[in-house]
Image (tube, rainbow, N blue to C red):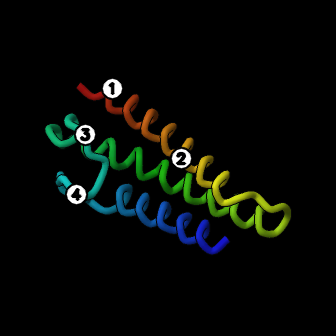
Amino acid sequence: MTQSIIISFLFIIGGAVMRYLPLKQNYFLGYRTFKTLRNREAWEVANKSFGKSMIAIGGLFLLMSIVSWAIFPIQFKRLMLGAFILVILAVIKTEIELRKIK
């Protein structure tokens, strides 16, 4: 349970950094693709979109962790698989947002 709560907060904090702090384009932190590193507008859109998704995933993961601890046990591996699938969906959502930018 402790692991999943820590991971939940890491998702939330990482998402908040991407969403709310003005990150300059770099190779170390943020949503990095060829398009986002070449285009400042794409960088901002991608980080805001992905950051928002990461906050939501972290909140959902935290809720699932608490429910699994309080009501019925779910294996940590299954929680991580659910979070992984949600991250993939967040990447797809962000890439769709990026395609709208010219």
Quadrant for the N terminus, please. bottom right
Which secondary structure lies at badge 3? loop
Nearer to us in this view, 73 or 60: 73
Q: Amino acid at mark 1?
A: Lys
Left/right of residue 77 with respect to residue 17 in the rendered view: right
Disc 4 element: loop
Q: CA distance from mark 2 to mark 1?
A: 25 Å
Q: Position of residue 60 (x, y in %)?
A: 63, 55
Q: Earlier in the sequence, mark 4 or mark 3?
A: 4
Q: Disc 3 marks which amino acid?
A: Thr
Closer to the chain start, of discs 1 and 3, is 3
User: Are discs 2 and 1 less than 8 Å apart at CB?
Assistant: no
Q: Which residue is mark 4?
A: 28
Residue identified by numbered label 3: 33
Task: Note whether 71 is above or below 50 in the view shown.
Answer: below
Q: Secondary structure at mark 2?
A: helix
Q: Is residue 4 left or right of residue 92?
A: right
Q: Residue at x 48, y 39 (%)?
A: 88
**Residue 58 vs residue 37: left or right?**
right
Q: Mark on residue 84?
A: 2
Amino acid type shown at disc 4? Phe
For the residues marked 2 and 3, what is the alpha-carbon distance in whole angstroms? 19 Å
Furthest toward the left, the residue is: 38
Q: Position of residue 65 (x, y in %)?
A: 69, 63
Label 1: which residue?
A: 100
Mark 2 or 4, nearer chain start: 4
Q: Marks 4 and 3, how far apart in space? A: 11 Å
Query: Which mark sits nearer the N-terminus, 2 or 1?
Result: 2
